[in-house]
Image (cartoon, grey):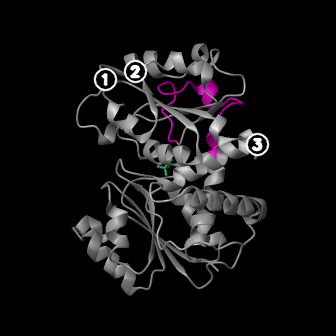
Amino acid sequence: MSTAWTRKDLLTIRELDRADIQLILDTGRTFKNSSANSGKKSTSLEGRTVVNLFVEPSTRTRTSFELAATRLGADVVSIDSESSSFRKGETLKDTGQVLQAMNADFVILRHSAAGAPQFLAERLKAHILNAGDGAHEHPTQALLDVFTMRERLGEKCAWKDLHVVICGDILFSRVARSNVWALTKLGARVTLVGPTTLVPEIFSELGVKITHDLDSVLPDADVIMLLRIQHERQRRSFFPSVGEYVSLFGLNMTRFKKCKPGVLIMHPGPVNRGIEIASELADGPNSTILDQVQNGLAIRMAVLHLLGGS
Ligand code: CP
């Protein structure tokens, strides 16, 4: 398997180039075809220690990183904020030094502060993987999202012909930022949709279109990615009411009828059913929500292998 990779860490999609993204997707494909689904173990990380350090809640990212590292033959330890010495006020720097003293080879960090993975990467010898830092980036989510698009639309899917609409809480979404970087580097067209307060004009500097009218972009979308409203990051109300948000930006059956028949409906999860997406669409044939979860395992095996496997 290819290991033509020179980076120590995976901190952002912004720092990757198109060839890096392509290599991760191709390596993810190899793992998906071999061990990711079958449970067959590889020896890529045999004798290595992987620490999952999750200072914010997670189901998908944490579980799939644990499974990915285990499938690659690593020893895996998971730490969360509630049961660790973070509760006693230990700093991230000191926690990192503790992990280094225990010879951790990889630290996978989810943190509420943007830049926390970069902070550790500058201080530790271990490979640092960003599992979501505040509203900044969530690189493996974007990688599994573009992997899922390519898988569902076919390997011959030309990125330049693809129009991806990302709708919802763009301002606070690390998933949106990482997807914008990944999709624009691959050559896709991206439109961001949401309330004016959650989709500021400054995002157009990233080479994307902005609109506040979801209905106007639905007929031309090949992929619609819905995002969760991140109440935990909002210190004030960014729209008058949930009911108004649903009526303007919720994907429901009436809106779905305006879409192309094969449109992909994506959501990184967790889903607020009945708010950003109707349940019948989340569970319907156009939905890729569980494909995204499944592909997270192959993509996380790929990045662990490329960063430090053999
Ligand atoms: N999409 C995502 O990051 O989900 P979790 O918070 O469950 O990891």
Q: Which residue is mark 3?
A: 154
**Amino acid beneath label 3:** Gly
Q: Earlier in the sequence, mark 1 or mark 3?
A: 3
Depth order, front residue of 287/66: 287
Residue 198 higher or lower than 252, as above or below: below
Determine the residue positioned at 46% across, 52% down: 138
Disc 2 target residue: 245
Of 186 and 51, nearer the camera is: 186
> Residue 244 appears in which quarter of the rendering?
top left
Q: Is residue 294 left or right of residue 173?
A: right
Task: Give the percent coordinates (x, y) of residue 310.
Answer: 65, 80
Residue in the picture at 59% in, 47% down = 186
CB under 8 Å between callouts 2 and 3? Answer: no
- The label number, if any, that marks residue 239 in the structure image: 1
- Judged left or right of residue 21, residue 181 is left
Identify the image quadrant of the N terminus: bottom right
Q: Residue at x 33, y 24 (%)?
A: 196
Which comes before the other along the chain, label 1 or label 2? 1
Can you say whether 310 is above or below 12 in the image?
A: below
* Closer to the camera in the image, 157 or 141: 157
Task: For marks 2 and 3, give the one nearer the viewer.
Answer: 3
Question: Looking at the picture, how far across and down is residue 56, in whole percent?
Answer: 37, 55
Query: Which amino acid lies under the numbered mark 2 shown in the image of this protein?
Result: Tyr
Image coords of residue 130 (percent x, y): 44, 61
Span colored in magenta: 269-292
